[in-house]
Amino acid sequence: MVISKRKVKKNLFIITVSALALYLFISLYFLNHFHFNTEINGVNVSLKAHKKLPGVVDEYIKNYQLQIIERNGETEIITGQDIKMRYNMANSLSQIKRLQNPFMWVSSLFKTSRYYINYFFDYDIVLLENKIEKLKCLNRDITEPRNVNFEYNKGSYKVIQEIYGNKINKNNLIKAINIYISEGKQVLDLDFMNCYENPEYTIRSEKTMDTKKLLDKYVSTRITYKFGDSTELVDGAVIHKWLSVDKNLDVIINNKGVASFINILSHKYDTVGISRTFAASTGRIIEVRGGLYGWKIDQKTETLALINHIKHGDIIEKEPAYLQKALSREGNEIGNTYIEINISKQHLWFYKEGKLITHGPVVTGNPNRGYATVLGVYMINYKQKDATLSGPGYEANVSYWMPFYGNIGLHDAPWRYRFGGNIYLTNGSHGCVNAPLYLAKAVFENVEEGTPVVVYEENEGAALPN
């Protein structure tokens, strides 16, 4: 059977008009009803008549409860009845009706439309505040959050995972609860809504790895300090005690700790003023104490240097910075080139590389007038020809000047005609060592800056073995 084109067109027209009429009829329904799949502040109002909204909302409120889920999985409930929750009738139906276009109902078949209206619900703020104050999450024993941490272990650092704890951010909690109740939401995950005080840096933070790398670099430092035949090692086992990490994950070097370590080295290896055993030219073993001669670490400079070595992860052998050095660290450190002054004998000997260059009588400081020549081991600070020496009540020109303790030194004394004996007890100097011209000249021509000067009294001592 053949169907005419005219009849086909007529049937299509009837179908189109019918469909349009059905669409318009359904649209008329949605003039006073909500679309399919419609929620307002959490209330399901799908296909409900606008005028029945108050009843629908009241029924929702009657059964409403906000479930609060803590980080540990425990839950607490705030019900609508707890806070006298109610529908806010001030939101007129005219406002509700404007939410949806009745002719756009078709799209609601395929998706859910969720609307939020300000002040859709009312509740007693005071009751809610009281309810919040009694929540268990605000009244538990607090475990404070803690950033990721670092622990030294056999040459490197391991990362200790952060602690999240259970400390609530109360402001965020109150804000989240109010938002959820206002929007009619029923499940509040405190963790998801940032209601906890959290660590700023975790094991996954980029800075965590940067900090670990820096810590590992610092403890990879290996400084071997040399003190003659002795050494002191500064490595990770020592350095890690000076390292800490602040709240921003910045590595802090304890400068005071480093300074204290250098101070300990100084006490152990500085030799200025120590007691020394000395073989006197008179054949006796003398114990000499005091003086300015010896090794002395420059603590401030070496502290800064060690901190810098740590920052660069250096691996080196070195001597520390010194304020002054002795000729060696062997034996009594005096060596075999030195000036020897025996106060008791009023005699001077000068040895160079073990060979006696010259010796002779001297006059030292007058002890009866408070000018006794200082005892101990010193060193020649410098030497000067044709110097003018001055002090309280005197001024003198000398040909050879060799100071070893401030303004105290060895020099010729052209005003003297006799040396040695007990002259120093009645007509001694102001502390200097006065020498005959020949003796001062011989010493001056052979001595060098830094040469030890041993000054002692031979009151006691053992005789040297034959």
Image (cartoon, grey):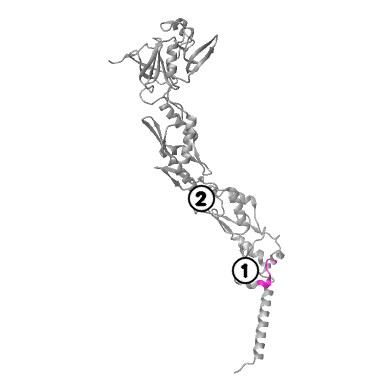
In the rendered view, does 95 fall on the left or right side of 73?
right
Tell me the distance, in whole angstroms, between the alpha carbons under discs 1 and 2: 48 Å
In the rendered view, does 149 fall on the left or right side of 187?
left
Q: Amino acid at mark 2?
A: Glu
Q: Is residue 19 magenta?
A: no
Say the numbered circle drawn on residue 206.
2
Whether residue 454 appears in this view of the structure is yes
Give coordinates of residue 350: x percent, y percent. 39, 16
Q: Which residue lies most toward the bottom here?
A: 1
Q: Amino acid at mark 1?
A: Ser
Give coordinates of residue 265: x percent, y percent. 42, 29
Whether residue 435 appears in this view of the structure is no
Q: 14 or 403: nearer the eye?
A: 403
When the figure is inspected, residue 24 is found, relative to residue 284, above or below; the finding is: below
Residue annotated with mark 1: 46
Give coordinates of residue 116: x percent, y percent. 65, 61
Query: What range of the chain is rendered magenta?
Result: 98-104
When the figure is inspected, residue 373 is found, relative to residue 274, above or below; the finding is: above
